[in-house]
Amino acid sequence: MTLKQMEVFVAIAESRSFSRGAEKNCITQSTASQHIHGLEEELGIRLFDRGRGGALLTEAGKLFFEHVQKILSECEDTRSVIRQFVGMEDVVLRVGASNIPGTWLIPDVLGQFVGQFPKVRLEVLQGDSHSVLDQLIKEEIELGFVGGYFEDERIELKSMGRDTIIFAASTELIALRNHDLEREDLCKVPLLVREDGSGTQKAVYEALSKALTVSKEDLNIVAVLGSSEAIRRALLKGTGYAFVSSMSISDDLANGRLFELNIPGLEITRYFYAARRYARELSPAAAEFWNIMTDS
């Protein structure tokens, strides 16, 4: 049983004519008769009485007509939904973002995206880089934007910008020491860090190990916090020192509430990445947002 057979059946039933039903479906009358014959063969019962009154539904035909109308209506609704999806009308696009991309990068291009595609609603789920990629793999989101490179054959990553990670502290703490911090001092000062799934923290630990042969265990970590904003607020309170994205404290650096300390031999630069499932087709809305994020 095919949709075409059902469409021909309904057209004949409504017009009470094989010729008019065939004409409505742009087929010959003999082809229409073959479609109906196929249905009757499959169902094992006649659907039409052919006589002087035209093609009239049998009792079985009336029952079949009632159900087929519902099926065809559902099919048209489905076509309409897909047309809206392709045309990006009344579409919800769910993406995931780690702290810096979700707080700074996405808002920077949001106006452009909304302006170009006003009928797409963007929903951003924030977490650390690991949790974002996990959501992507589980297909809970269609795109992810993270603060580091992660090897996974299920994911395709594309670079979309660079960030500098600096070592910062409050005015009060800076007053107690020089703006330079040696390796030995770094291992003694009270340190505020992000959770292990953070792209920022991953970049920090890798740079410390490579440039200064300092491991996580060498550091005096006094608190593990779950966001850049939490780190920032703790810095402002003078709670400790922290490696942070320069983006996340740019205003505080400019107005003198926080200061950058220099650690000789250490410079930390990391890239942001857009992530998608490998070898999977993106929805039209996701493809457009991917292009905006990776081209900006």
Image (spheres, helix red, strand yellow):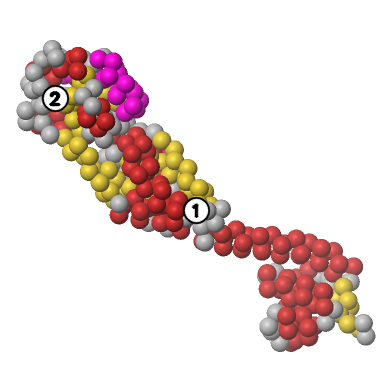
Neighbourhood count class around disc 2 (C-alpha, 10 Å): few under 14, some 14–19, many 20 upward: some
In the image, what residue occupies the spot 67% across and 70% down?
2
User: What x and y, as percent, mark residue 94?
Assistant: 47, 45
Q: Residue furthest top?
A: 176
Residue named by callout 2: 261
Residue range of the region highlighted in magenta in the rendering: 217-238
In the rendered view, does 232 fall on the left or right side of 210? right
User: What x and y, as percent, mark residue 250?
Assistant: 25, 32
User: What x and y, as percent, mark residue 254?
Assistant: 22, 30
In the rendered view, does 85 fall on the left or right side of 60? left
Please tell me whether residue 255 is drawn above or below residue 119 in the rendered image: above
Residue 227 within the segment the image draws in magenta:
yes
In the rendered view, does 251 fall on the left or right side of 122? left
| Residue type (three-letter) at the residue carrying disc 2 | Leu
In the image, what residue occupies the spot 71% across and 87% down?
28
Q: CA distance from mark 2 to mark 1?
A: 44 Å
User: What x and y, as percent, mark residue 283?
Assistant: 46, 56
The tag on residue 59 is none
Residue named by callout 1: 118
Q: Residue furthest front?
A: 255
| Residue type (three-letter) at the residue carrying disc 1 | Pro
